[in-house]
Image: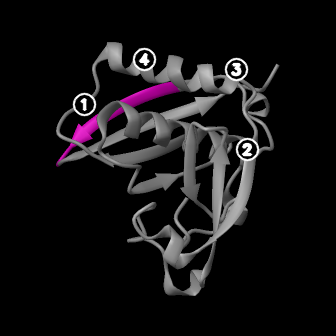
């Protein structure tokens, strides 16, 4: 989540799923995290700088990978680091000056770490099943729309 966005509008389960999607996209394609996201309770979307749409096989792999991480019941924890410690470790380009010198890091097990100010679940088992609804590509932007089911 961008520090400029209102964390009160974020749904913790969906927001945590967004982190897993971002981690998966970065691991699979090495193009970084979403540059824009709109997270809501029923469905959400993430936009990535990309050069094409995803294939059906890639969509399936992303869904399977995210759902595997959810099934692992990974802990979701927060920690704090200084802005200087964050340099070189995280992309600070969207971090406003108002974020201060003490930055919050959300870690999902060993799978994903990200600077974030929004609400999250305490364990991935709380998320539910992740499903990509659709993807589209236009003008260098890949949009992924997704939803989650209620956890079992």
User: Toward the viewer: 81 or 46?
Assistant: 81
| Residue annotated with mark 3 | 71
**Residue at 43% in and 15% down:** 60
Q: Mark 4 or mark 2, which is nearer the start of the sequence? A: 4
User: Toward the viewer: 10 or 50?
Assistant: 50
Q: Is residue 139 left or right of residue 13?
A: left
Q: Position of residue 9 (x, y in %)?
A: 68, 60
Residue 92 among magenta residues? no
Label 4, secondary structure: give it.
Answer: helix
- Tell me the number on the disc at residue 53: 1
Specify start and end residues of the magenta stretch as a single range. 132-139
Q: Nearer the viewer's eye, disc 3 or disc 1?
A: 3
| Residue annotated with mark 2 | 76
Alpha carbon separation for disc pair 1 and 4: 14 Å
Label 3, secondary structure: give it.
Answer: helix
Please rate how many residues cluster around mark 2, counting C-alpha atoms within 10 Å: few if below 14, some from 14 to 19, many from 20: some
Residue 8 in which image quadrant? bottom right
Alpha carbon separation for disc pair 2 and 4: 23 Å
Residue 136 among magenta residues? yes
Please rate how many residues cluster around mark 4, counting C-alpha atoms within 10 Å: few if below 14, some from 14 to 19, many from 20: some
Please rate how many residues cluster around mark 3, counting C-alpha atoms within 10 Å: few if below 14, some from 14 to 19, many from 20: some
**Residue at 77% in and 26% down:** 150
């Amino acid at each position: 989540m961008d520090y400029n966005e209102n964390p009160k509008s974020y749904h913790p389960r969906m927001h945590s799923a967004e982190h897993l999607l971002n981690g998966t996209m970065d691991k699979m394609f090495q193009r970084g995290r979403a540059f824009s996201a709109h997270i809501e309770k029923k469905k959400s979307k993430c936009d990535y700088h990309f050069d094409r749409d995803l294939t059906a096989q890639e969509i399936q792999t992303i869904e399977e990978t995210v759902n595997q991480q959810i099934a692992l019941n990974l802990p979701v924890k927060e920690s704090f680091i200084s802005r200087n410690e964050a340099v070189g470790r995280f992309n600070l380009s969207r971090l406003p000056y108002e974020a201060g010198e003490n930055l919050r890091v959300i870690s999902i097990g060993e799978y994903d770490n990200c600077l974030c100010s929004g609400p999250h679940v305490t364990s991935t088992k709380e998320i539910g099943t992740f499903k990509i609804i659709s993807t589209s590509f236009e003008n260098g932007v890949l949009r992924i729309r997704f939803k989650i089911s209620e956890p079992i």
